[in-house]
Image (cartoon, rainbow, N blue to C red):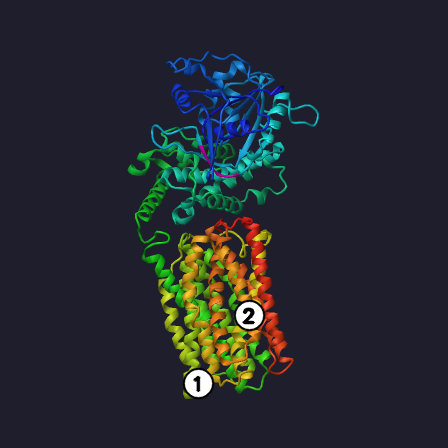
Amino acid sequence: MTGRRRVHIIGLGSIGLLVAHSLRNMQDPPPVSLIFHRLELLQQWQRHGQQITVQDGRQLSSKEGFEVELTPAAHQSGDTLTPLPISEEPIDCLLVCTKAAVTVAALKRLRPRLSPESCICFLQNGMGTIEDVNMQCFSDEGNRPQYLQGVITHGTHLSRSGPDGNPFLVTHAGHGSISLGVPSNGAVTGHGNSPYRNSSSIYISDVLREARNLGVVCISSEELLQQLLEKLAVNCVINPLTALLDIPNGTINTHGGLVQLMRSMIKEVSSVFLSLQELSHVSNLEHRFSADRLEQQCHKVIQTTSKNISSMLADVRGAKPTEIDYINGYVVRRGKELGIVCKTNEAMSRLRFDRSTRKSGIEMTGRHRKLASLIRATLHSYSKQKAGSLDSPDDGKRAWMQVAMAWFVVFCTWGYVNSFGSFQTYYSENFSYGSSTISWIGSVQVWLTFFIGAFSGRLLDAGFFRSTFLVGSILQLLGILLMSFSKQYWHLMLTQGVLTGIGGGLIFCPAMALLASYFTKDRALAVGVATTGNSVGGMIYPVVARELLPELGFAWTVRIIALLNLACLILPLIYMRPKIPPRTAGPVVDWSALRDPVFMLFIAGLFLALWSVYYVFYYIGSYGAEVLSLPYSSSAIVIMIINGIGVPPRIIVPLLADRVGALNIIVPVALCMAVVTYAWLAIETITGYYVFACLFGIVNAAFQCLMPTAIASLTPELDLIGARLGLAFSCLSFATLTGPPIGGVLHGARAKDFVAAQIWAATSIFVASLLLLASRVKKAGWNLKTVV
């Protein structure tokens, strides 16, 4: 350890202990001194073996060899088990990991040991601390130490449980990084182009970077300020809301009232940041600190740390002062300087963060009374939700009522769409058009059902679910009714293809996005149950067509289908209710998804799979009629089988996906579907034909029921589900538009020869499974135990 300077650490919370452990875990560790500010804590250190233990997953790592000191104030308060002399040794490198509220008091005690040759590195939440330190500890700029500051994204918390628990056991819940730089406020200009003024700052920067598990990267002062502000925006939301309600971070996204409060705070934060003089030179200022982008970052952090608790909640549980004055309070102070009123953040900064807050309410007066009422209402609503009210996610009648209503929507849209194979066979026998030409009707219908989702999903996010659903229902019913009067090909294209496709797109995507927002833990199961409407509809509509066409003719058969859809669509129109508050701002389409390689690989895989799936659905009946010489009634039965047998997988597979992850399931399912489609080449008998229909129906149902769930799981924010699903469906629409006609051309080139089309379909699904696998590996690596 020759030549290694001593590093002092004050603030022995979870971050301070993690950093201390990481420094001693190095191959050539520096000497590390822990500064205790309380005798009680030092006594516990001595009782627990004078070591720091970090739990990372299932692994425990303990490190010893630390030296300890007591601050002068701690010496004056009593005796220790092992008396320590007051140290007067100069401090070269000091890591400050204390809470912002006690930083000034801590540094005042160490002031005599700090000099301009020292370096103080602040590793803590909040902003405004350095200004306070300059004012109260180092008012003479010429005698200030060099400052460094870090932006920490590691997820940590103390694992102590009970009065006799170990306060030096840290859980490293989430690996992140530390962005380290020289703060512009109070910093002294370095030599030449270097921001570092003394050797101590260079040394501590190098040492921290050597501790590889900390993930330290050095950044410029300008970038440091921007990252500090971005983290402050996230903390302004997560810290006070979780501390108020005593909840883990992830709960914020599940309650509409909390999302509403979040948006109000973020809007104020964005207004302040966009007006800061120190950011005026930032080229992408309007984008980087826009309310939409800051809200997206909040949702992302909430999702990735959903099971963790905030540092402020940990303080409240430990009856310690919070950092609210340096988080929301900082925003309020800067807002006042700029003439910007931050009512919601000021209300939050005035709250009493203790157990009684949640029991006795919030005491506020004057202009904050209205906000206090809003916060009280939110707390009351959350309390009802926590007790198991109808608003509770994954539970209650209201949530499962949405499943039932979504089932009717899927029945009327995809159940009807998947029965087109019956109409394909009927049109081939009764119209003088080729099979590829006829398949364009069904392809256009599916294309529009998917494509319109790009816009209808965003209408849900904006709060227009009811009106969108009403217009979509009218258009679908009108298309089916006018279809009954069709005499020519273009009549069918406009009615069954265009009108019903547009109507289906307006109701399907919003309904599925609405359903997904009601569930977190059981989302795959809920979506799977709803999509059984696809399979049931795929049985009912062919039966109606098979039985009524010979008896009543085409016109009245179609009119009865219109009446059936009318009865089914009235119920969702009445009972479906959005859960997430409207997001009035933001793009129609979530274009950020196009920059997400995981999402794009996943969509590419779905595209190739659906390219083939709808070819099989449309032509399986024609295959029976042309190759096996089956009559129309028998070909219609296979359409019923391929749809109906998919009901059990749509329930069983989601149950498994909720436990091991939708992405983990959809990859092997796609591979199985490719194998089954290749097996279609070997079918020469009627028995084999029905066996193939059963197997394909099972794997296809499992595949399609996982699609919305997997897309939702790749969406970082609940209120972006509609836009993200819409973008996905619009991309997939072109697969369903072109797939069946391409297959029709391939087998139409040689009469009754489906081989080329079968090879194309099976190979497309196989390549799709590889792309889905690449998406899964890109997101979570090769660890099969990761739930994703």
Where residue 259 appears, as percent x and y from the top left, is: 42, 47
Quarter holding residue 45:
top left
Quarter holding residue 94:
top right
**Marks 2 and 1, how far apart at CA:** 31 Å
Element type where label 2 sits in the image: helix
For residue 523, above or below residue 45:
below
The residue that appears at 45% across and 79% down in the rendered structure is 637
Where residue 584 appears, as percent x and y from the top left, is: 48, 53
Mark number, residue 179 = none
**Which residue is labeled 1 in the image?**
549
Majority secondary structure of magenta residues: strand
Element type where label 1 sits in the image: helix
Where residue 722 appears, as percent x and y from the top left, is: 48, 57
Viewer-side residue, 58 vs 424: 58
**Which residue is labeled 2 in the image?**
677
Where residue 199 appears, as percent x and y from the top left, is: 64, 21
Magenta stretch in the rendered image? 170-175
Q: Earlier in the sequence, mark 2 or mark 1?
A: 1
Viewer-side residue, 273 vs 521: 521
State yes or no: residue 172 in magenta: yes
**What amino acid type is highlighted by mark number 2?**
Thr
Viewer-side residue, 762 vs 329: 762
State yes or no: residue 236 in magenta: no
Query: What residue occupies the far left of the structure in this picture?
Result: 360
**What amino acid type is highlighted by mark number 1?**
Leu
